[in-house]
Image: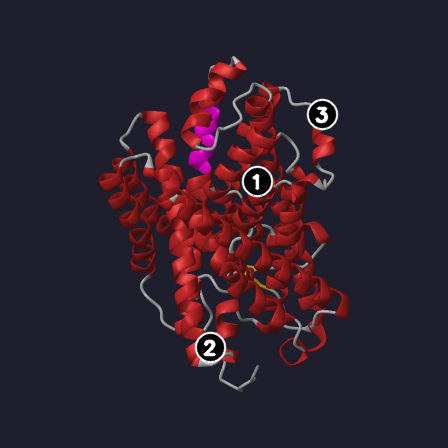
Amino acid sequence: MSLPQTSKTSPSLGEVHRSIPIPNGNFWRKMLAFAGPGYLVAVGYMDPGNWATDLFGGAKFGYTLLSVVVISSLMAILLQFLCVRLGVVTEQDLAQACRKYFSPRVNLCLWILCEVAIAACDLAEVLGSAIALQLLFGIPLAVSVCITALDVLVILLLQHHGFRYLEAMVITLISIIGICFSLEIIFSHPDIFAIGQGFVPQATILQNQEMLYVAIGILGATVMPHNLYLHSAIVQTRRWQRTDEKKHEAIKLATIDSTIALLMALFINGAILIVSAATFHSSGSQNVAEIQDAYQLFSPILGVKIASTLFAIALLAAGQNSTLTGTLAGQVVMEGFLHLSFVPWLRRLITRLLAILPALISILLLGEESATELLVLSQVILSLQLSFAVIPLVMFTSNPTIMGKFVNPRWLTRISWLVAIVIAASNAWLVWQTFIKVIIQQYI
């Protein structure tokens, strides 16, 4: 990897860069000032694309795959920690670092792949929000897809008043999701002992081909590539002093913020699987894989009228939350890779249209039942892109020329490369198995 000396580029999200001061004083005041970016990142780990795999995993295999949810979340915590280090030390986001240290040809490929991944992720979030609107209000799915475009106005309004307002909105929606699934857990009366067993990795996950497929699907749906670009940029919304001591402090506080937020995402993903296991696996409804089916069955099986409504409300909150951060990630990627800035509303509108148009065309031509197939397709595309974000991140943070005294220690570098290899191998296997299934369905 060459290390050309280039002039410092202008920051991504320049309108909010270093806009939030860090107060002098005790630890808790500083911690409060750093709280926020981690939650914007965490919503990508609980987006609607995760729901189908968690629901199916719980319905089909009970609590067994809880250990996979935990392992995926630990990988996410590590990767987001590396993003914090990169953003704080170099004051560049991952896209800017790629632009600086890779050749133009490599950068063009990475940018195209990342834009495709963001569009795929946005597609899942648009569909999740649209399905929730349909379930709650009976709105046709095609109309619901169009309504989701309005969240662009919400982003602009909140960010106009300050980045903290956007963070507060995201935290509020996460809280709604958490409350909804806490109630669902209470309603479903899960087996506490079985939950404890589920957190322990079991050999049957590797031995059972179908279980392994779902397990890798959970891994692929949990770690989102655009989050790596986003986190390395939004951590720079904090105005820490540019000294080694303050950088150490910024890394520590930002890592605490993201770790707490990702543990909350772990709770929600685990809760989806637990509720699905307690509701569907125990009742014999083990083939529930679609969000709409889960919604229809929750209240009848649990005997609680509000159970299905709470599920749909949580889905709507998850979809809206993820679209808020997905459009920010799109802005970071374009500004970082191309050093090209659009007017924020135009960039976000383009990102949203790239998701709405495929969803709308598919629904109008193939019917509303195609929504689930689109969700699956979006996760496969994300799986293909993930390694192209993880590998550069590990490369940069392990390079002493780039990171100086903040370079990853040897033990962290080894663990990071192990995670990168596991993710690459798992997602390659998942994509291959998905391809094989399509071939079998179409021609055999």
**Is 312 a magenta residue?**
yes
Q: CA distance from mark 1 to mark 2?
A: 48 Å
Which is in the foreground here, disc 1 or disc 2?
A: 1
Q: Main secondary structure of the magenta part?
A: helix
Q: Amino acid at mark 3?
A: Ile
Please identify the residue farthest to the right as the structure is shown. 411
Looking at the image, is mark 1 or mark 3 earlier in the sequence? 3
**Is 210 a magenta residue?**
no
Q: Position of residue 139 (x, y in %)?
A: 28, 29
**Crowd band around label 1 with a 10 angstrom C-alpha radius: few (<14), some (14–19), many (20+):** few
Q: How are the colours assigned in the image? A: secondary structure
Q: Nearer the viewer, residue 394 or 14?
A: 394
Left or right: where does residue 408 sit relative to residue 264? right
Q: CA distance from mark 2 to mark 3?
A: 53 Å
Residue 57 position (above or below residue 411): above
Which is in the foreground here, disc 2 or disc 3?
A: 3
Q: Nearer the viewer, residue 71 or 367?
A: 367
The residue indicated by pointer 1 is 210
Q: Nearer the viewer, residue 372 or 287?
A: 287
The residue indicated by pointer 3 is 192
Q: Secondary structure at mark 3?
A: helix
Which region is colored magenta?
309-317
Looking at the image, is mark 1 or mark 2 earlier in the sequence? 2
The residue indicated by pointer 2 is 9
Q: Amino acid at mark 1?
A: Glu
Q: Amino acid at mark 2?
A: Thr
Q: Position of residue 307 (x, y in %)?
A: 49, 20
Q: Quadrant of residue 60?
A: top right
